[in-house]
Amino acid sequence: MSTPPDDGVPDGYFAILDPADPAVMTYWRVTAGRVTPWPRKAWWGPARPLKRDAPAGMEERIAWMRSWQTAYRAWAATVHQLLAADPGPARRRFAELTTRCCDCGRVLHDETSKTLGIGPDCRDGISPAALAALFAPAVSAAHAAQADTPVTRTESSR
Ligand SMILES: [Zn+2]
């Protein structure tokens, strides 16, 4: 099931523990803010309801389906929040667990790419600082904020 675009999650590939089952790693692709399972045919989250488990009555069947949809949407919203809050580690995890580029999803071949978690085409022209920001945006934001803070000189330092 794909979900509506979510402004909070940057494009790329991500791996995150299932918030409802920490024994399961889930994989996601984000394109133009749209979050979809990876690989394309994978299913993560609450299991899809089976027709044979559906209640007989029409109204009961609708309520049963709605209750599953509500549960799935809540689960998906949690995944999106976790990805949006800290996308860097989830990107890094995807690259490490799949040996694929966290940006385009292609298989990484050389050692440098595997270490960086991003392929040569995708990192072309990206500065080391920007690469670091890709995986640890919170850390680089803190550094940037610190660099922007004007240093107040004391009388004695003049
Ligand atoms: Zn790539």
Image (tube, grey):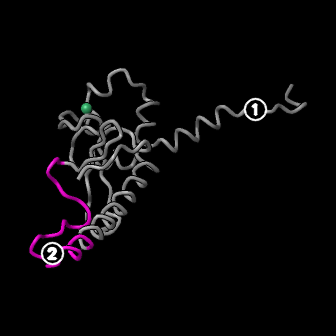
Residue at left offset 19%, top offset 58%: 43
Categorize mark 2 by other alpha carbons within 10 Å: few (<14), some (14-19), many (20+). some
- Across and down, in percent, residue 95 comes to 27, 44
| Res. 27 visible in picture | yes
Could you tell which of marks 1 and 2 lies nearer the N-terminus?
Answer: 2
> In the picture shown, does residue 27 fall above or below 121?
below
State yes or no: residue 17 in magenta.
no
> Which of the 4 image quadrants contains residue 21?
bottom left
How many tags in the picture? Answer: 2
State yes or no: residue 41 in magenta.
yes
- Across and down, in percent, residue 50 comes to 13, 70
Q: Say which residue label 2 marks.
A: 54
> Which of the 4 image quadrants contains residue 91?
top left
> In the picture shown, does residue 18 fall above or below 112?
below
Q: Nearer the viewer, residue 129 or 7?
A: 7
Q: Amino acid at mark 1?
A: Val
> Which of the 4 image quadrants contains residue 100?
top left
Marks 1 and 2: which is nearer the front? Answer: 2
Which element is circle 2 on? loop
Which element is circle 1 on? loop
Q: Which residues are magenta?
A: 39-63
Q: Amino acid at mark 2?
A: Ala
Q: Which mark is residue 151?
A: 1
| Res. 112 visible in picture | no
Q: Nearer the viewer, residue 82 or 32?
A: 32
